[in-house]
Image: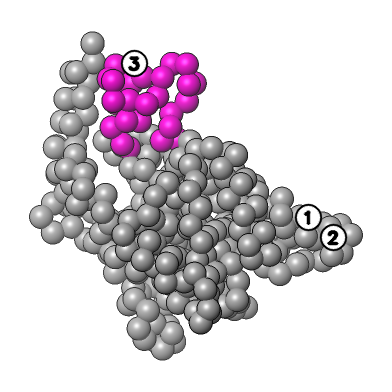
Amino acid sequence: MTSSVAGKTALVTGAGSGINLAFARLLLSRGCNVVFADLSLRPEALELVNAHQRPPVTAQAVFQKTDVSSWKDLSDTYELAKSRFGRVDIVCPGAGVFEPAWSSFWRPPGTDPGVVDSVASNGYKSLDINLTHPIRLTQLAIMDQVRELKAAKGGVDSGVPPRRTVIHVSSVNGQVAPLWTPLYNTAKHALNGFVRTMGPLEGRLGIRVAAVAPGLVNTPIWSTSPDKSGPLSQDPAWVTPEEVAQVMLDTVEKDQVSTSLRGDAGRDEATEKEGLVRVAGGSILEVSGNQVRDVAAFFDPGPQGISSEDFDMEKMENSVYQALEKIT
């Protein structure tokens, strides 16, 4: 079964940059309205939103300033999307942070003035962003789907309304456990488990909850964060935000996607000659190297498009012990 995004509406958190911006751009190009939910927009994102404000463009873009760690902000943004466009068909809780110094396991609360976590906060901000926010936004989408189903048919077992999709952005870190990024790893492992748990909802409620799990993606985080780019090798196996975004779109629209990364051009023609991977609720698709593959729940071989050679493992581990030395 295929389902075009044309004429539909998507809510994308973290759409101000990176993978989520590429996904928002692709959705708009296919005639899908997009609510950009982020704290701010990079110049290229702002330009894109401004270019999709009113006719003659076929798809509209709206920016809503959103702190994804705030449940109120998430609810307000979801309701804004509904009030503006009538229905939220696609939800992408894509906003995330990569073990930032201000909320890192190796910089405990109270040990560094730059850390936003505190003993009184009873939590890690990075987990609020990377794990709690996507869970809560999924919950909002499910609640919406159930209400629609009840209104249309009189009960959750009596029929299926138009399909709704929640597409998460996981990571290959959900399959591995580098010492360097424990909170990030934990969030992605947990997110994978959550996505798989939601799998049966597609058949019963008509809501697909799935995820992409990118490897090394060439986004601003690497060029603007020396502490993150330092351990990278000279020539890592990058994938582009646009390649990941295309797989995200395919996951929303299709029940099978190509196992080869080719970008948008010629992709549909290529699928007939190449391998296909099945997509359904609970699917997690690794996007790394030059391939797309299904991440199995059991006996998975681990990331296939990325290797330890992409990182200086000694430098990564040394950075952990250097951080611990600063604890007083």
Image quarter (top left, top right, bottom left or bottom right) of the C terminus = top left
Callouts 2 and 1 close, C-beta under 8 Å: yes
Question: SS for tag 1?
Answer: helix
Does residue 270 sit above or below 196 in this rendering? below
Task: Please state which of residues 94 and 173 is positioned toward the viewer in this rendering.
Answer: 94
Give residue 147's mark.
1
In which image quadrant can residue 148 be found?
Answer: bottom right
Relative image position of residue 89 (x, y in whole percent): 62, 65
- Is 117 covered by the magenta stretch? yes
Give the crowd class for mark 2: few <14, some 14-19, many >=20 residues within 10 Å.
few
**Stretch of the chain drawn in magenta:** 99-127
Q: Residue placed farthest to the right in the image?
A: 154
Q: Which comes sooner in the sequence, label 3 or label 2?
A: 3
Residue ID at (13%, 37%): 315
Q: CA distance from mark 2 to mark 1?
A: 6 Å
Task: Please state which of residues 7 and 61 is positioned toward the viewer in this rendering.
Answer: 61
Give residue 110's mark.
3
Give residue 151's mark.
2
Q: Main secondary structure of the magenta part?
A: loop
Residue ID at (62%, 54%): 80
